[in-house]
Amino acid sequence: MRAIPYQEFDLRREWKEGMKSTKYVIVGGGMVAGYAAKELVNRGLKSGELAIVSSENALPYERPPLSKGFLAGKDTEASILINSLEFYHNHGIHVKLGMAIESVDAKHKRVRTHSGEDFAFDSLLLATGARARSMDYPGRELRDVFYLRSLEDSRNLRASAATAKAAVVIGGGFIGMEVAAVLAQKDIQTTMIIRDDRVWSRFFTPEMSTFFERYYSTHGVRLVKEASIAALEGKGTVHPVLLVDGRRIPSDLVVAGIGAIPNTELLAKSGIALDNGVVVNEYLEASEPGVCAAGDAANYPDLIFEKRRRVEHWDNAISQGQHWAGIVLGDRQPFIHVPYFFSDVFNLSYEFWGDSSGATQTVVRGDTNASAFSVWWLKKNQVVAAFTMNHREEEREIAPEWIRNKQTVSPQRLTDQTRSIREAVQRPS
Ligand code: NAP
């Protein structure tokens, strides 16, 4: 691959003076943009039709490695790019990096950057993503206190972890679970501080929490539950973390993963309907014509679960980015998709489909004391969510299929592992 610094790829060199205008403009240069661009190209995008305007200084990259392989030092910045620099050059896609959008004028179909440049569009995709929720504890401004959202965040955390002996991870969600695993594998004395009485009560059954707590403990992560932070202490750098109950937890670095907030401030005066993100319909269309939203910032109607949701996961960014590309090229299908996420921690890889809220029963296949099992959430015998970890391959295939088709099953037959899982399907009597 030809080595060209990203900053050199500046569309001002290629555009005439005055108003810049393209058929499609994507605001936000994250995963949605990377995969939407790829899909548009696959479907015949012409040179000069697409511009991506990004506040980041890197081409669209895969975000999952930031808390896994990249943080661990296994992936490189080049290896996590969604498309190479040549891809954008070769297909005439304008990519403007390091440029934040100040406002969107949906009526006149243009966006304005903080530096005063205007971009006109026929179709706009808002892929502004989300940002890390920040802490309000005293000491949050100390050195070696991190959030993890961008490549730059992960790069900085990785550098700090290279010399740290002790780390505190605040929050027991996706970032907390994944980062604690990476730090512990770097032989850093790692403590996770969570507010709840068990890990991930939002997704896990009590048995699953017990399994993960035991697994983390035997792999070197100390878990402090039902704890609140009073302050991050230290002079210059953070050391230690003070809990409300007076305990002090050693730390050379702190990582907070306490949730994410959709980036919609630039839309405040746009007239575009906002409510926990950009409100879109099943075609990902916002309230103003010619404007769509996708990814972390899109609040969309989930037609399977018949409720609105905003999903902050890799799979959703890809699926919605690709879906939008199809829609603007005339393939106007509703977005119907089973919510999904995956995670890799230590030597475990697990996946989750669906929505377990409102489930009335869970069925376990396998042994929750071992590292290989699946869990099925049922609502009146209808499969609404599934978790699999190192378990049978056919279960990975059947989980999204059943959830999408609102399949009802026999809980007794689902429990019976001497049979294929497919035999659990409830036949009409
Ligand atoms: P998250 O998964 O929503 O978890 C937030 C955690 O922080 C929860 O444990 C929550 O505890 C806790 N928390 C919230 N406010 C707190 C506070 N003020 N003080 C202490 N703890 C607090 O969010 P995240 O881990 O920060 O991840 C951010 C985003 O990155 C998520 O949207 C996620 O989807 C994405 N991500 C996804 C993956 C993946 O799909 N594998 C990996 C990494 C990141 P309570 O339960 O008590 O509220």
Image: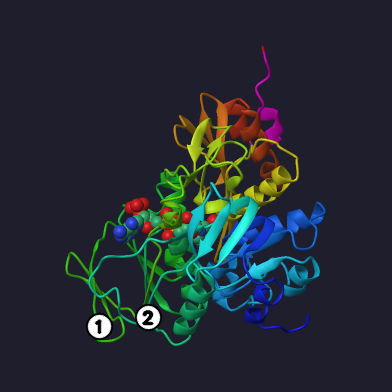
- Please identify the quarter of the rendering in which residue 12 is found: bottom right
Q: Residue at x 43, y 71 (%)?
A: 220
Q: Are marks 2 and 1 in contact (CB under 8 Å)?
A: no
Q: How many marks?
A: 2
Q: Residues within 10 Å of mark 2 (few under 14, many from 20)?
A: many
426 within the magenta span: yes
Q: Label 2 belongs to which residue? A: 144
Is there any visible trace of residue 220 in the rendered image?
yes
**Image quadrant, ligand 1:** bottom left
CA gap between label 2 and label 1 equals 11 Å
Considering the whole magenta stretch, tell me its main secondary structure.
Answer: loop
Q: Label 1 belongs to which residue? A: 234
Question: Which corner quadrant holds the C terminus?
Answer: top right
For label 2, being within 8 Å of ligand 1 is answered no
Is there any visible trace of residue 372 in the rendered image?
no
- Please identify the quarter of the rendering in which residue 335 is found: top right
Q: Position of residue 252 (x, y in %)?
A: 35, 82
Which is more toward the observer, 85 or 219?
85
Q: Residues within 10 Å of mark 1 (few under 14, many from 20)?
A: some
8 within the magenta span: no
Q: Is residue 122 left or right of residue 300?
A: right
**Span of residues in magenta:** 417-428
Q: Is residue 419 left or right of residue 104?
A: right
Q: Residue at x 74, y 68 (%)?
A: 88
Q: Residue at x 61, y 40 (%)?
A: 338
